[in-house]
Image (cartoon, rainbow, N blue to C red):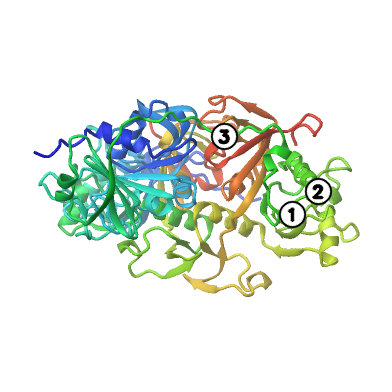
Amino acid sequence: MTSVPEKPTANGKIFPTAQAALEGVFDGASVLVAGWSASDEPEKLLRGLGEIGVGNLTLVCQGAWAQKPGKFGIGDLIATGQVKKMVSPLPFHPEYGGPVKDRWKSGELELEVVPQGVLAERLRAGGAGIGGVFLPTGARTRFAEGKELRPFDGKEHVLEFALKADFALLRAKTADTLGNMVYEGTGRNWNPIMAMAATVTVAEVDQVVEPGGLNPELVITQAIFIDRLVSAI
Amino acid sequence: MPGKPLDPSFVARRVAQELFPGAVVALGPGLPWGLPSALRNGSGVWLVSDSGFLGFQGPGTEAADGECQTVVMLSGGAYTGVVDIGGILRGGHTDIAVLQPAQVSANGDFVHWTTAATQGLFAPGPAVDMAYGASKVVAVIPHQNADGSSTILGQCSLPVDGAGQVDMIISDAAVINVSQDGLELVEIAPGWTVDEVVAMTDAQLSISSVKEMGFEVPALEMPNKVYPSALEALKDVPEGSIINVDGFAGPGGMAHYLMVGLRDLGVKGLQLISNTAGVARVSGFGAPNIIDHSILVENNQVAKATASYPVSPSASRPSAFEEAYNRGETELEVVPQGTLAERLRCGGAGVAAFYTPTGAGTLLGEGKEARSIGGKEYILETGLRADFCIIRGYKADTLGNVVYKGTSRNFNPVMATTAKITVVEVDEIVEPGELGPEEIVTPGLFVDRIVVRPPEFSAYL
């Protein structure tokens, strides 16, 4: 008979705190962060990363736009100096600027700016086991510089490689204890593909229900992609 | 004294004149967001926001993007995620993209957000996907920057975010068409003269006939998608068409009524893309007279099948397709199931080709480009597209939004994105709003025609 060691930090996939759910995030880790222009970000997990203080992170996210007062967002994490590189389609709002612009200007933050659909497709490829994809997006611009080009149907396409990360920090409305998740409105955004593209996925959720509490036709992210859950509240 | 620049709301009203009933219209950040409020009735088109709204109107109560625009989801609207938005933008599903570049050049190049304010940092956001994916790209811009310099230039002075992608410029003073021959001034705003517009444009404008801009917003209504019968919905399928046929292996999730319609039309030379080439009957699923691809094969309508399970599970009970293939009457392309799904997904999402590990080093990889990426072997597979697609939903609303039941979802959602004309067969057609925006699996913008499965066909399978 095999004895299963008890996990002191978690009840199944449910972790008591953000810090516990982020156990194992290491110096130099790559981290996907869901959210949209400062909305629907996994705030508690971002705070947790800030508290852990682990550095040299590479963040892959939509961007770091101005946060509402009292909230802790991607920009606030960048302000801590823990992030060395950010991969993003809209790194900051031009009228806001904020820590991304400041640290990029001072050379403390490296930026890889990519079209949104290209980033999404690279993550999807990473999560779906595809090595690379030929996309028409950005042909004959700086987005194609240094990349392999090939014509398909008479149109130039750019080879983009899959993107995977060590961790993904997600934000959902409701999860069941197995990790099946649903979102509310545009809160879906990057979550479903980021959930597939990381070695360890951590989701911050408004509420957790028992298995069966979510309609199987409506589940957007399946439990097999989710490793850890933490309450947003 | 030159004219007064138009208020952005009037620019938006002029943009509205470029729309047509049922158009899929993607909005980039900035001025394009005047459009949802300019439309008297947003339900005649599919407005797409990169944040994941499909089918909305403005203003409303939900934040739509980082610029603090608000919208309201229309009845029949759906939420989706970033990767599916990317597919909608890139996969030939977007009719018009409306963008606000910082600069546009005479050959249609544009610079998106690189401005003095960003101090050299650029932000392509969704604009590049929209520009490279949409059938028509409309740039909405102030004609001049605050310092009086022109936003329309012979050549962009900053690195471009799109090369030769802009088709039309609607500014606060003029409408300019962009073609390979350069810029043509076609409309000027009230109060402006042609000479004034030419003087403040830093690019050559050709001029033959110039009208005054109008601001009437067209009344747009969604085209009818509900057809009275399978025969009506399929009557223009030409000979030799490539047709996606949904279903898995058994009868579940298969569009039997549409299949019978195709048979009754008798159209020949069909190239079917489907998980099987018709094994439900020989596998003995369901009733003995079960409908599957075999009815098309037996009617000599099938020239080729692209499938992952082309043969019967029992050698002693070959399928109709196998027999036809063995007689040399049909061609066959065998594709692993996941590769078939991925080729369809790529066809629908504007991905020309992809490297997959599946089949590397086997017969399935023969004749295909092999490549090592990160120490793993991959083969290059190309996207698949079809002329028509027949799929089986559970319910559709009149706008074409579809939900499925259980595993009958299978190939349906991905196939719906890859055909020029997608026809869906459902148990029930409901009014927009009856399917919730979080619940919709196939958004209506992918569906062209809807028929109700008649009661003489089996109940939901």
Viewer-proximal residue, B435 or B97? B97
Q: Chain of mark 2?
A: B
Label 2 neighbour load within 10 Å: few <14, some 14-19, many 20+: many
In the image, is residue B156 above or below residue B70? below
Q: Which mark is residue B401?
A: 3
Kindly state the secondary structure of the residue where label 1 is placed.
Answer: loop
In the image, is residue B349 above or below residue B453? below
Q: Quadrant of residue A160?
A: bottom left
Q: Chain of mark 1?
A: B
Kindly state the secondary structure of the residue where label 2 is placed.
Answer: helix
Amino acid tagged 3: Asn
Residue depicted at 47% across the width and 58% down the height: A126
Residue under label 2, please give it.
B280
Horizontal and vertical percent for residue A220? 53, 39
Residue under label 1, please give it.
B276
| Residue A61 can be seen in this image | no
